Amino acid sequence: MATTAQVIRRAQLYVPGSSMRFLEKSRGLQAVDSVAYDLEDSVTPTKKPEGRRNILEILNRDRVPGIREQAVRINSVGSGFALDDLTEILKGKHLDCLVVPKVDAASDLHFVTDVLRQKLPERHAAGSKNPVKIVALVESARSVMDLSAICKASPYLSGLTFAAEDFALDLSLTRTPSLHEFMYARSAIVTAARAFNIPSALDLVSTTFRGEEGKKQLQEESENGKRFGFNGKQCIHPDQVQTVQSVYSPSKQEAEWAVRVVICDRKADAQGRGAWTLDGKMIDAPVSGKARAIVAKAELCGVDVKGLQERFKDEEPQ
């Protein structure tokens, strides 16, 4: 897909669009991959017009260096508010992404895609390098069962996000710290994202994060999501961002291992060796592919990959 290149959303932070104070404060963030200015759950129906005006003002200001991507979470297509949201928000000069909630069917994304093409034809013409990307929130049983169609619904689809609270409500589930009750849905989302080459798979919000116990739970949830195959997580408070982005970045050990594998794989390939060993473990095509992906992500995350390459340039495949 054209929109998949160079996308990194380790954290996506929601900021209420109805609060100009919070919107202003968000512009002072030091380093966050994605900020999603919210028009949905955090904004009451009577405040929607004010929220749209606030967010549009922010999007038309000069970009700030601490925010990599500026997104807006609109209201769901079935809410009756989505077209008004899009009509106003798409006037923003520095809009990068739309977060679309309650995507139950491909038709929801067809609607958003049609509006994008109508309102911003130059950004959505064939071959455009800068379309407005779409992140779809998966919030219901119907959505999980229709993931294949949803993933094929728009060429601008750039992410899938698991909205646990609404999903739990839909299925009458009780959320527990283990998250076992969400295993099927979370696995389905990650699998669909990989199968359809969608770059972002964002895990559920951690609702407990204050104090030492809260920080520990946030860390554990983030690590759990990474093991599950997610590459980012939703955040509802700026204090969550650093922990989440740290977990979803390649660790020092991961980056070093990946660079060593890539260097050795190049040498092994020149020697005609399809499989070889490093540190006593066999390395073949799937492992070297994983290593290349880690190196690419490490570069995006600001890791000194060139320094690591210089450090390990003499590494040899065993």
Image (cartoon, grey):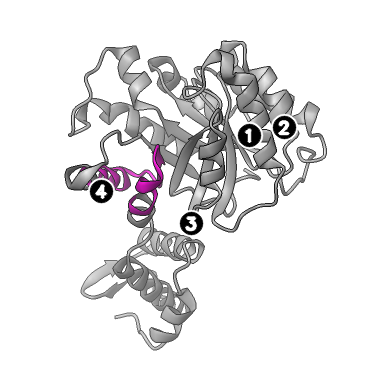
Q: Up-down: is 44 above or below 125?
A: above
Q: Is mark 3 on a helix, strand or loop?
A: loop
Q: Up-down: is 296 above or below 166?
A: below
Q: Can residue 194 be seen at all in this image of the molecule? A: no
Q: How crowded is mark 2: few (under 14 residues within 10 Å), some or many (20 or more)?
A: many
Magenta region includes residue 144 = no
Between tags 3 and 4, which lies in front? 3
- Residue at horizontal 40%, vertical 18%? 140
In terms of sequence position, does the residue under pointer 4 or pointer 1 come before the other?
1
Amino acid type assigned to the residue bearing label 3 in the image: Ala
Q: Can residue 15 be seen at all in this image of the molecule? A: yes
Q: What element carries label 2?
A: loop
Q: Mark 3 points at which residue?
A: 31
| Residue 195, horizontal then vertical, whole percent | 47, 39
Q: Give the range drawn in magenta.
A: 217-243
| Residue 288, horizontal then vertical, whole percent | 39, 65
Q: Residues within 10 Å of mark 4 (few under 14, many from 20)?
A: some
